[in-house]
Image (cartoon, helix red, strand yellow):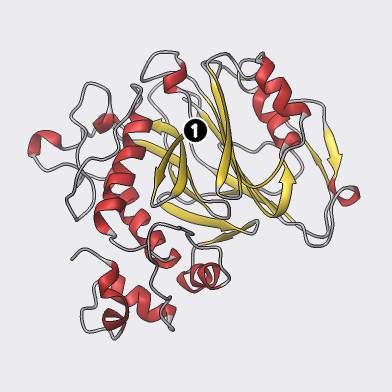
């Protein structure tokens, strides 16, 4: 299967070091040679590079490895084709505009229900129009479109970050369980369970990462997610896939903080944290967040969704009330504050 790389930063940071090691897995130190892609945010815009050639040999990847472009938020992917041909339209990360915001998505794994020969099921608790449709043949792009369609149907005003986090968590849970689909024929084949590890960029500040790991019978590759955080005091990091190290203490400041997310650790001398099964983490300012109060603070400091075309209601005063409301407590006072934020 494929491999993922994500980076989220407190200050604009280049990703030359991490990408240089990551690309080696695209045909040199590993077999993921069926294309690669990279997308990173600059303000409301993005720069995107895609190539159906192996990352280890791609001239475009050479450019990225030697061009220290700085960003707060980036996603990259190297592909080992399991669903869909080796073609540019099947190269991750994918991107779509929703609510005047560019969302980007990369996936590692296999979601049989969204294969190219299947009728892609609707996910989410509010039915709506299938505005987003896949261009290529991958299950990954189909899942991305399904997530966006579900979010677009659910929200009629721009959701705050705690609400968006809970909505994405619910959709991920539905994707990896038997509830995805409306008929008995749609139910998941227990002999072909999903493997679903994804990175979802939602504007220049935040990135969601979710892991439902696994391995196919006979495979020696475990498909999951892990991350490391580089912050003061910085140290030297050594790549696992090539003879390359950087003393980050010499090239950073006290305000720098960088989270690096990957399928497997990129370095051999840093502490990497493996995701729990079914864990959704929001990365902002180079740090991981999963507690609802922490995610509310991301919104409060202005790193939530920013749109010029869709209104956002104020964040409720109590993040706990917000979470209780979204969890289904119909008598919560938060209903009066935010109920118009949803299609009910």
Location of residue 332 (image quadrant)? bottom left
Residue 87 vertical position relative to residue 282 in the rendered view, above or below: above
Q: Is residue 141 above or below residue 291?
A: above
- Residue 82 vs residue 94, the one in the foreground: 94
Identify the residue at horizontal 19%, vertical 38% (top origin).
Answer: 121
Position of residue 280 relative to residue 339, above or below, is above
Q: Is residue 126 left or right of residue 317?
A: left
Q: Where does the image place residue 235, in percent across and percent down from the top left?
A: 84, 50
Which residue matches tag 1?
93
- Residue at (40, 67) in percent of width and height: 312
User: In the visual, does 10 lie left or right of 47?
Assistant: right
Image point 72% across, 21% down: which residue?
Answer: 62
Res. 327 in view: no
Disc 1 crowd, CA 10 A, few/some/many (<14, 14-19, 20+)? many
Looking at this view, is 98 or 277 the one in front?
98
Residue 107 image-quadrant placement: top left
User: Front-most of 44 and 191?
Assistant: 44
What residue is shown at x 82% (from left), y 26% (from top)? 243
The spot of residue 246 in percent (x, y) is 85, 39
Task: Give percent across and percent down for residue 65.
Answer: 74, 27
Residue 46 seen in this snapshot: yes
Screen quadrant of the C terminus: bottom left
Q: Percent from the top left, x then y, of residue 148?
A: 33, 45
Number of numbered discs present? Answer: 1
Residue furthest to the right in view is 250
């Amino acid at each position: 299967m494929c491999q993922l790389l994500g980076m989220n930063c407190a200050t604009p940071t280049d990703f030359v070091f991490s990408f240089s090691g990551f690309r080696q897995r695209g045909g040199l130190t590993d077999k993921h040679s069926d294309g690669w892609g990279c997308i990173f945010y600059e303000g409301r815009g993005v720069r995107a590079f895609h190539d159906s050639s192996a990352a280890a040999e791609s001239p475009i990847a050479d450019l990225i490895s030697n061009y220290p472009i700085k960003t707060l938020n980036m996603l990259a992917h190297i592909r080992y084709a399991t669903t869909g041909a080796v073609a540019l339209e099947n190269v991750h990360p994918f991107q779509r505009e929703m609510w005047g915001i560019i969302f980007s998505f990369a996936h590692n794994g296999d979601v049989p229900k969204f294969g190219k020969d299947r009728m892609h099921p609707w996910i989410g608790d509010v039915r709506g129009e299938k505005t987003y449709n896949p261009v290529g043949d991958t299950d990954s792009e189909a899942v991305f479109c399904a997530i966006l369609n579900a979010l677009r149907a659910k929200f009629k005003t721009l959701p705050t970050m705690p609400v968006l986090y809970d909505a994405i968590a619910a959709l991920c849970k539905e994707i990896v369980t038997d509830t995805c689909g409306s008929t008995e024929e749609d139910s998941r084949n227990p002999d072909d369970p999903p493997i679903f590890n994804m990175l979802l960029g939602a504007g220049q500040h935040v990135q969601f990462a979710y892991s439902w790991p696994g391995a196919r019978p006979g495979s020696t590759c475990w498909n999951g997610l892990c991350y490391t955080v580089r912050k003061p005091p910085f140290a030297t990091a050594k790549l696992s896939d090539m003879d390359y190290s950087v003393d980050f203490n010499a090239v950073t400041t006290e305000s720098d903080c960088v989270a690096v997310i990957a399928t497997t650790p990129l370095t051999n001398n840093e502490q990497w944290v493996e995701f729990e099964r079914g864990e959704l983490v929001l990365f902002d300012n180079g740090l991981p967040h999963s507690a609802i109060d922490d995610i509310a603070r991301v919104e409060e400091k202005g790193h939530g969704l920013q749109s010029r075309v869709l209104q956002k209601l104020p964040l409720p005063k109590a993040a706990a009330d917000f979470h209780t409301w979204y969890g289904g407590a119909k008598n919560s006072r938060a209903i009066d504050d935010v109920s118009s934020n949803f299609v009910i």
